[in-house]
Structures are given as structure tokens and as C-alpha cells.
Amino acid sequence: MDQGIRPPIRSPSGREIPEEIDPVLEELVRGIIGQVADKWTMLILEVLEEHGTLRFTQIGKLTGGISQKMLTQTLRQMERDGFVSRKVYPVIPPKVEYNLTELGRSLSAAFCAVWEWAAVHHADIDASRKAFEERNGKA
């Protein structure tokens, strides 16, 4: 039996699948997906990408429908992960501004690809949903 190097395993899309996945990297990826799959993180990324540096209340208004508590929690998590920077000005009342870091901009660019994909495929998704509802008596 040949003990040589095995050919790489590939996914159906053609991407190479590593033989072993680093458990630290896997945990990081799962955590990032869990966070950014959260609608508030995605919406805040979009707002900051479109408008640049913003104050807390501006982010809340532009995001729409987010409570102050959820906005605070989401911005803290995004700051912790390095997606946003927070600048506090020593004035009264306090002035705090947020903006995307380079890391946050790169993540925002990755989500831009999702928007582009959705724009191309939205009719297909709508058709699939309608067909599903018709098959399941919910039309």
C-alpha cells in the first residue's frame, strides 16, 4: 500500500478542506459567526461603514429599533473584538464617538459580498419560498 501524500479533499464547491482543523481557529470562527450573525452587529457595521464616525445616539437612530441596552452591549462586544474603536472626549456632557477599525472594515467588506449575493439571488429565494408555502398549504 502506498504511504504517499494523499490528494486534498475538496468540498462540492471545489474548496480544499484541510485534513485537520485547528481547534483554536474553529472556536474563533464559530464565535465570530455567532456574533456577526446577530442582526444588530450586522446593522451597526453597515451604519458605520456608510456614515463613518458616529456618536452613540446617532448609531441608535440610524440602526432603528435597537434599545439602548442592546446598542451598548453590541458596541462593547464589537470593541472587544476589535471591530470598532471608541473615543471618549473629556467634556460634560460626555461625548463618545465610534468608528470602524481596519478589522471592522474588512468584516464589513465580507458582508458586502452577502448583500451582492442576495441582490443576484433574491428572485430565486422568493420563488423557492412561494413554492414551499404552496406545497405545504400556506399560500
Image (tube, helix red, strand yellow):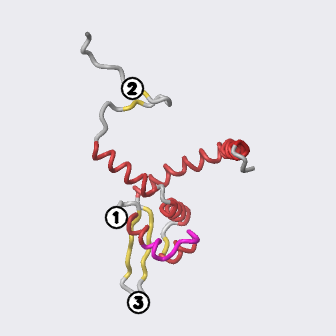
User: What amino acid is found at the position of numbered circle 1 in the picture?
Assistant: Arg
Disc 3 element: loop
Residue sitting at the far bottom = 92
User: What amino acid is found at the position of numbered circle 3 in the picture?
Assistant: Ile
Q: Position of residue 62 (x, y in %)?
A: 57, 70
Give neighbour class at mark 3: few <14, some 14-19, many 20+ (Cα, 10 Å).
few
Mark 1, mark 3: which one is toward the viewer?
Answer: 1
**Magenta span: chief secondary structure:** helix
- Using the image as rendered, state which of residue 23 and residue 98 is in the foreground: 23
Q: Is residue 49 above or below residue 93?
A: above
Mark 3, residue position: 92
Residue 80, labelled with which disc?
Answer: 1
User: What amino acid is found at the position of numbered circle 2 in the picture?
Assistant: Ile
Residue 9, labelled with which disc?
Answer: 2
Quarter in which the N terminus is drawn: top left
Disc 2 element: strand
Among the two numbered marks 1 and 3 on one chain, the one whose residue lies closer to the N terminus: 1
